[in-house]
Image (cartoon, rainbow, N blue to C red):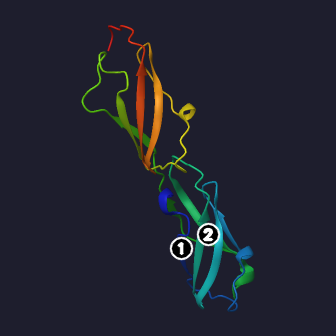
Amino acid sequence: TEANLNNSTVNLSLNNETFKDNTLSILNFTLSGAPAGLSILSVSRTDNTHATVVLSYTRTDFDSNFQNFRIGISGRELSGGPDLESNPITITALIESANIAANPGINEFNLNNKQITLTLQNERFTDNSLNLSNIHLNNAPHGVTLGSITYVDNRNATLTLSHTGSDFDAN
């Protein structure tokens, strides 16, 4: 999945073919159908017909599955000569989201200094220095803004609302 791509391993098995020698060059292996930010970190030969490819991933976000991911092997690595390509495998995307919760419920009379917990799903904060200008309220009533944000951990933050006290009659 997208979450565990970095340093993940793919085991290759050759059928009716063998590796030419004991040394495999990373330059003779390619990725196709791969998400942006995915590359080969290393390749190691296990035996005449097996190798392990370690992948490197920069955490470039993607939100659609990659259903035709393959690894290509140059014929320069093989005793028989022609290039080979692995069977396809699927790399599953993770959809990131943010959930908010306030307890007790929010109403017009308790908005000022009301704290809301923000919880990230399939995502995390990169560090503990959160910038209030990067968080936006959608569909907030007139007079309601973000007063502050406090880092809790890499998946949670506490938002404190500010309210001018202006009246609003629509929920």
Q: Quadrant of residue 141?
A: top left
**Is the C terminus in the top left, top right, bottom left or bottom right quadrant?**
top left
Residue type at mark 1: give it. Val
Say which residue label 1 marks: 10
Q: In the image, what residue occupies the spot 59% across and 75% down?
A: 53
**Amino acid identity at mark 2:** Ile
Q: Circle 2 is placed at which residue position?
A: 71
Neighbour tally class for label 1: few under 14, some 14-19, many 20 plus, Cα within 10 Å: few
Q: Give percent across and percent down for residue 35.
A: 60, 55
- Quick one: which residue is furthest to the left in this view? 104
Give SS at disc 2.
Answer: strand
Image: 140 above or below 97: above
Q: Can you tell which of label 2 and label 1 is closer to the viewer?
A: 1
Q: Are marks 2 and 1 in contact (CB under 8 Å)?
A: yes
Residue occupying image coordinates x 61% and y 69%: 71
CA gap between label 2 and label 1 equals 9 Å
Residue 146: numbered disc? none
Quadrant for residue 160, please give it. top left
> Quick check: can you spot residue 9?
yes
Horizontally, residue 28 falls left or right of residue 156, namely right
The correct choice, above or below, for 33 with respect to 131 in the image is: below
Residue sitting at x 42%, y 34% = 159
Task: Pinpoint residue 59: horizontal percent, then vertical percent.
Answer: 58, 55
Sequence-wise first label, 2 or 1: 1
The residue lying toward the viewer, choosing from 96 and 84, is 96
Q: Residue at x 43, y 22 (%)?
A: 162
Above or below: residue 151 compared with residue 4: above
Badge 2: few (under 14), some or many (20 or more) residues near its Cα, within 10 Å?
many
